[in-house]
Amino acid sequence: MTGSVPQRSRPGPRRGLTERAILDAALRLVDAGGAEALSVRSVAAELGIAPNALYTYFRTKADLVAALGDDLLGRLDLGAARTDGDWRPAVVRLASDLRDTLLAHPGVVPLLMHTGFAGPGALAAGEVLLELLSRAGLPDDDAARASYLLQTYVLGTVALDAAELPPGAPRPDDATRTAARRAALGGADPARLPRTAAAADVVAAYNGDAQFRWGLDRLLDGLRG
Amino acid sequence: MTGSVPQRSRPGPRRGLTERAILDAALRLVDAGGAEALSVRSVAAELGIAPNALYTYFRTKADLVAALGDDLLGRLDLGAARTDGDWRPAVVRLASDLRDTLLAHPGVVPLLMHTGFAGPGALAAGEVLLELLSRAGLPDDDAARASYLLQTYVLGTVALDAAELPPGAPRPDDATRTAARRAALGGADPARLPRTAAAADVVAAYNGDAQFRWGLDRLLDGLRG
DNA sequence: ACCTGAACACCGTTCAAGT
DNA sequence: ACCTGAACACCGTTCAAGT
């Protein structure tokens, strides 16, 4: 009656399952189907495990979502910004990297908005930003305020862009985002909202990397001594 | 067998139920319990009706949420901004009103981030903003860009504030928000993140209306000709 | 420690039926 | 047109049990 070792049975541990593998699976689902495609059960199915197995790694779904967002922020190349000579191009680069990283996974953005920005990745990026602004000659309290200002600008921009995108369209290019914005403003009645309707026609100037850079430059101009 | 008129029976119409009443009930729930307290079923229970009765007024829950967000934006007093003399105080006033309106109902903010900003309320506010920036002397395309810049700033600020707040705490004051931010930054290790940790100590300068005004003023400085 | 099966109290939405 | 009851296919989470 001594059978062979139960190699393919159900309960026991699995060597392949890690926090990393879970976050990768979650990101795959969000990229493919937007934020609403992410559920404890869908992640478990993606990994081929029982739903409640995830609770060994994350206390709640909210914790998983927070880790997913911060994981993205942790991918920023902070070393480059840190060693650049001038503070201003370094700030522009850091802000642009953050924007690119988030817009590469637009489904994550609304999730980030729920969870705050206090994970290790977010804090590390904030620290570098404070360094750069200090190097710019700002006193500590102004640097703290300016850091907050820059963060809100990047996140606000990304949130507006991401909110207008249809779910399940990862890595949208400028053309996709411009079309989304035109669609959002397209309903404006020219009789009642003449300027908004006109802005919809010049929407190409409204969006994309150039628009982001324009705003960022205005903002940094405002920070000058 | 002809009974009295069935005045208290189940199926028929109800005169008291309107789109307004539904949105009011939804806002009550979000204010009391945060975004996650809002469900089709909870709204129905609040109104004393069957869950599916709501589908007479809103095609989906997403439509209800979008209407709830835009309803809030529609409460802005645009007339005041429109008739003010100088453009700059009018812009400051409009931006501050928007921030106050949203922070009075922080649970709505993450919901807004999902749905975009293309309802009548959002478009009307955007139109006034374009008027003011045009009055400031900006050419049309710069006014469009500046309007977007200002929107992202306000929404980014509010989103960061709201994300750090515990759910179910409506109308938080500056002290509450400052405490939330200190809690969020409190985990920073002074050895690895010295500037972040120091910023947590001067967090009062980081947050609240004064911080918002500081950033807004920097931003408007950057827009000067 | 790590995983499963089964269950609990929920969801959003649809459909047929009643007024 | 407006509402209900019942059902469908889902949720997040817990608990006892297996390895």
Image (cartoon, coloured by chain):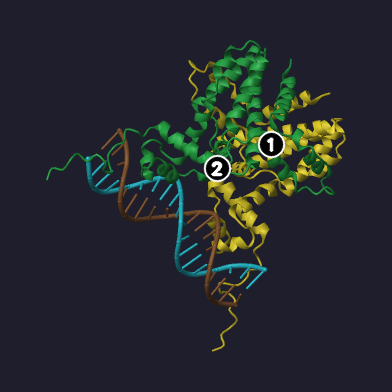
Chain colours: A yellow, B green, C cyan, D brown
Tell me the distance, in whole angstroms, between the alpha carbons under discs 1 and 2: 19 Å
The residue sitting at 54% across, 42% down in the picture is B35
The N terminus of chain B, quarter of image = top left
Percent coordinates x, y for residue A89 in the rendering? 81, 32
**Residue A157 visible here:** no
Question: For the residue carrying disc 2, how many other residues have a C-alpha within 10 Å: few (<14), some (14-19), or many (20+)?
Answer: many
Residue at the image point whose x is 58% and y is 44% from the top: B167
Q: Nearer the viewer, residue A164 or A60?
A: A60
What SS does tag 2 mark? loop
Residue A34 image position (x, y, % from top left): 56, 45
Chain for mark 2? B
Question: Is the C-beta separation of discs 1 and 2 under 8 Å?
Answer: no
Which quadrant of the structure image shows residue B50? top left
Q: Which residue is mark 1?
A: B175
**On the rendered image, what quadrant is the C terminus of chain B found in?**
top right
Residue B207 visible from this viewpoint = yes
- Return the mark for residue A55: none
**Outermost residue, top direction?**
B85
With A55 as the anchor, is A101 left or right in this view?
Answer: right
Instruction: Identify the residue position indicated by label 2 in the image.
Output: B34
Residue depicted at x 66% and y 38%: B176
Q: Could you tell which of marks 1 and 2 lies nearer the N-terminus?
A: 2
* Amino acid on which disc 1 is placed: Ala
Question: Looking at the image, is A109 positioned above or below residue B124?
Answer: below
Which element type, helix, strand or loop, lies under badge 1? helix
Question: Which amino acid, by three-letter code, is at mark 2?
Answer: Gly
